[in-house]
Every structure is written in C-alpha cells, then in structure tokens.
Image (cartoon, rainbow, N blue to C red):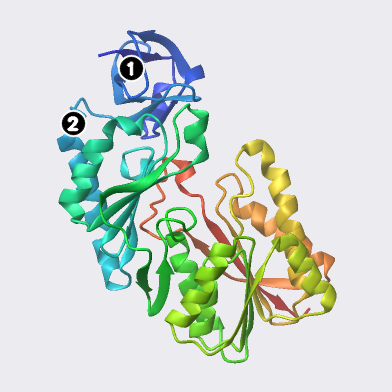
Amino acid sequence: MTRIILNKGKEKKIQNFYPNVFKDEIKNIMGPIKTGDIVDVCSEDLTFIGRGYIVENTKSLVRILTTKEEEIDKKFILNKIKVAYEKRRYLNKETNCIRVFFSEADGLPGLIVDKFDKYLAVQFRNSGIEIFRQEIINALKKVLKPKGIYERSDVENRTHEGVEQKTGIIYGDIPDRIIMEDNGLKYTVDIIDGQKTGFFLDQRDSRKFIRPFLNSDTRFLDVFSSSGGFSVAAMKEGCKKVVAVDKNPHALELCLENYELNGFTNKFEVVEGDAFSILKTLANRGEKYDVITLDPPSLIKKKIDIQRGRDFFYKLCVDSFRMMETGGILGVVTCAYHMSLQDLIEVTKMAASKNGMALEVIGVNYQPTDHPWILHIPETLYLKALWVRVVER
C-alpha cells in the first residue's frame, strides 16, 4: 500500500481525529497514487497514523477513514452506515425525515444521506468517495431497506475535481412528492427538483425554537424561505400574516403546496425575487413585522470572503430592523462555516445601533443532532442561528 509521509509534527492533528491531509503537510509519497486509492498516512519516522482515500486536484489530498490498521472493505462501509443510523433512531419519534449520514462527522468524508420517510437522497460530494459507490448503496439498502434511492450529486466541487455532476434514480422508485412530518408540522418534499437534497433538515431545531414566540397577532416575514420551513411553523401557531420571500419559483410553489397540505387559513403571501431588494422595498413602504427570519444560502465559501459575508448580513439586518418596533424578533441564520456566531453577533448589533435599537438575545441554535458537530473537526459546525428581540432602553 502506498504511504503518505507527513512533515514533522503534522501527524498530531490526525491523531486527534482531524480527517484531512493537505498537500503542503506532506513530505514524501512512497508509491503511486490516483483518486480513490486507499493509502496509509505515516509520521516522518514512518509510524502508522491513519488510513484514507486519495482525492487528486484538491488541497486535501487524503481524506482519513480510520486511525486503525483495518481493512477498508464492504464490512467497514456497512458498519459506518449502521452506527450512524442507530445514533439517530430516537428522532423517529418526532419526524419521519432525518439526515442518516453526515460526511466526515460520521466517518466517510464526502457522503451525505438524507432519509425522507421510506426514500433516500444520496450525495457523493467528491471524486474519491465515488470509488465506494456500490458498497455504500448496498449498505444503505441492507440497513435502511428504502423503497427508493435518488442521487443528488449535483454539487459544484465535483466539477472542480473533473467529475461530472450526477442526479437520478439509483434504486427503486421515487415519487414526485413525499410528505414529511416534523413535530406536528407537514411539509411537501421534492427530492428530485427541490433545493439541496430536497429539504433543509438542519433547521429542525430553529423551527421548533421560534414557535412558542408566535401567536394569532404575529406578522411573520420568512426571508430566503426555500419551501417554507419557517412559514409553515408560523402558520401552525396561527400567525395572522405570513409572507415568504425567495428567488426560486419552484421553492415558492412548494410553499403554496405546504399551505394547502396543512389546511391553513392564515393570510399567506409568497414574493418572488431578490431578497435584498424586496427587504428594502418593504421597509421603504413602511411595512411592519413582529418576527423576521433571515436564512440565506451560504453567502461565503472561503475565509477571504468573511468581510463580504458580514456586509451582506449587515444590509439584510438594517432593512429588517427598519420594519420592527419594540418587542420585534429577528432570527439571523448562517450555514457558512467561515461565518462565525461572533460575526453574526457583531453585524446584528451594528445594524440595530444604526436603527437606534437595543437588543436582547433570546436564543442561539446550531444544527440538530443528526448533523453531528465533532469538536475535533471544526468544519462540522456550520449552522448558527442568532435570535434577538428589540427592547426599550
């Protein structure tokens, strides 16, 4: 087996369970390599450190699978899938849709699996994990016994690695719509054409968090609504007015389907277009809302873009606060790893100050437990939600 020899001292992070070996940390490569090859990673003195697979054309040349000298075979893959699902079984009491596998957080970097009732959406996020495609599919069929598996490997980084994006049915049949039940709420899920793998499962805790603050007098604005995760929660609590804003027309179609599915009678409106422009227009009109959620897609992909991301959030928050009065609640959410909770706090505070408002923090959410946050892998903490209320001072 080819051995990857690390520069002195670079073995420590692998011994502490960090899964990426970067090219500039490598002293020598003893043997041939190609994408998907299993290799041993060793310290400078040739001591075994870990075993993983190669991904060429990326900064992370090796993705670690284990720190043990064990075979990477179908039994290994099956065990990873089993362990991941067993950890999440308790969630079946509150929802029929969960993230079954979360990439490096569950021990197979590059693999995402979401379970929507009896169907699975699978994402092979890099060219290296493709090598285990059949073993993974076989393991999913054995452990979860789905009626169908659909591939959503339509992610940008595959193109950067010279691998085509893929979508389509892998196994069984996939219906046009699946009904998701989540803490008393119902959602229409579109695995085939919906955003990401079909639904943003990672907002489960945030949807649950905001509901006790809502009532029949609440005017609710759901910005970057996608298929209406927050909108449905708001209508379930009887909010008298709910507005969903998104630039994706199909997402807004799903919002309306969810309205019908739940039999709501609340005043509900969908607005298609650029959220930044729409927020400014609503604020200039003098419209008022009691609760606003800002849940944009990942606005920044790299560390160097942090300031640009902060500027985006600042603009969103400034116009949101213009539509609020004392007691108003703003939820500011980022799914960008590089955007920290402290960044959210700073931009939200600055935007409130510009509007002459003081804020109290009523809550902070992260991603739910089926999207595990591994302390040794900082990148696994990506979702942060800051909830603030306008107070008199």
Circle 1 Cα neighbour tier, 10 Å, few/some/many (<14 / 14–19 / ≥20): many
Q: CA distance from mark 2 to mark 1?
A: 21 Å
Q: Which residue was labeled with disc 1? A: 42
Q: Nearer the viewer, mark 2 or mark 1?
A: 2
- Label 2 amino acid? Asp
Going 21% across and 25% down the picture, which residue do you hit? 69
Residue 152 percent location from the top left of the image: 40, 47
Q: Which mark is residue 73?
A: 2
**Would residue 190 be seen by someone viewing this image from the given angle?**
yes
Please say if 50 is above or below 167: above
Dot 2 or dot 1, earlier in sequence = 1
Task: Name the quarter where the C terminus is drawn.
Answer: bottom right
* Image location of residue 242, percent across then percent down: 61, 81
Q: Which residue: 39% across, 54% down?
A: 371
Quadrant containing the N terminus is top left
Q: Is residue 228 visible?
A: no
Q: Is residue 373 above or below residue 368?
A: above
